[in-house]
Amino acid sequence: MGGVSAEREISLQSGAAVLAALQSAGVDAHAVDTAEPGFHAALLDGSYARAFIALHGRGGEDGVMQGLLESAGLPYTGSGVLGSALAMDKLRTKQVWQSSGIPTPEFSLPGSAAEVTAMRDSLQYPVIVKPAHEGSSIGISKVESADDLLPAWETAAQYDDNVLVEQWISGDEYTAGILGETVLPLIRLETPNVFYDYAAKYQADTTRYLLPCGLGAAQEAALQVQSLAAFRAVGASGWGRVDFMLDEAGQPWFIEVNTVPGLTDHSLVPMAARAEGIDFTQLALRILATATLQQGGEAAHA
């Protein structure tokens, strides 16, 4: 939990919630903040049987922690090294989806301010500008006009060397929680903010979570199947969340995969799990039960 990414505060909240839930169920669980000096020794001294990863963002959700735990032979929750690294990288995720025929918004990848300036008048606005490796909507801007493109790119470039300029999809935003091989009920998100940003996710009381999501049963089931396919395409496993837009014609556009989504009181996977009769403690236990090693690319339960 914790860590040193831009999402540290949310990681601490998620970790504290999971720790309390596991301890309430009688699990001998302990907190390890990976921002603390010497955490490697505490984590790898042989006293732990499994690791519940509640780290969001870089260093915890991108394959780094997964690689450390693989090397130590300590089973851990969530996706393996490859799935974590791919899902954390929005650029590679989109490239995998495009090659797999999974619909995702068109994008460009300007590498400099000069390239941004050169392309600004050729775009169809609005667009969304985002760093390739951040989560929780950090560094993301909706750009309505050419004059605002460069400042948005410069903001995103503070967080990442790779910045996506992505087609804006008008429509409703949905999220699909995944637990093992099960896709939880879809949630439709409504916010008065420009989009479902950091404030809407973690701070605002004005965000609406529609569950049931309002779609017909057949359409929801079809979108759940597509969400699981998008999740698997990047090598994700165990549990996670897939976010997508549904445009005005009913076409889904897949946005990203979260391999360690939030586990706070505002978080979406616990909300969807409750709709299936799974309370937070049960959810934490079920996620813990998926702890594996991904030896040779195959999940190996300890």
Image (spheres, rainbow, N blue to C red):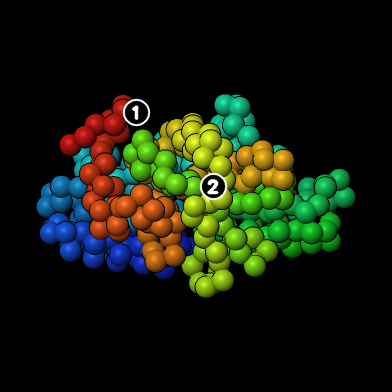
Residue 295 lies in what quarter of the image? top left
Quarter of image, res 148: bottom right
Graded by Cα atoms within 10 Å as few (under 14), some (14 to 19) or many (20 or more), the crowding at tag 2 reads: many
Closer to the N terminus: mark 2 or mark 1? 2
- Above-or-below relation of 154 to 180: below
For image coordinates 63% across by 39% down, the residue present is: 252
Q: Position of residue 90 (x, y in %)?
A: 56, 44
Q: Quadrant of residue 284?
A: bottom left
Residue 73 image position (x, y, % from top left): 21, 39
Q: Is residue 141 above or below residue 87?
A: below
**21 is higher (above) or lower (below) than 249:** below
Residue 256's x, y, as percent?
Answer: 54, 45
In the rendered structure, the answer to whether residue 155 lies left or right of residue 56 reads right
| Residue pointed to by mark 1 | 297
Q: Please provide percent x and percent y for residue 188.
A: 55, 53
Q: Nearer the viewer, residue 189 or 27?
A: 189
Residue at 64% from the left image edge and 51% from the top image edge: 172
Name the secondary structure under disc 2: strand
Label 1 residue SS: helix
**Image mark for residue 243:** 2
Q: State how far apart marks 2 and 1 are (Cα).
A: 25 Å
Q: Residue at x 25, y 53 (%)?
A: 282
* Residue 163 seen anywhere in this rendered image of the structure: no
Q: Quadrant of the N terminus?
A: bottom left
Amino acid at dot 1: Gly
Name the kind of residue labelled 2 in the image. Answer: Asp
Q: How crowded is the residue under tag 1: few (<14 C-alpha within 10 Å), some, or many (20+)?
A: few
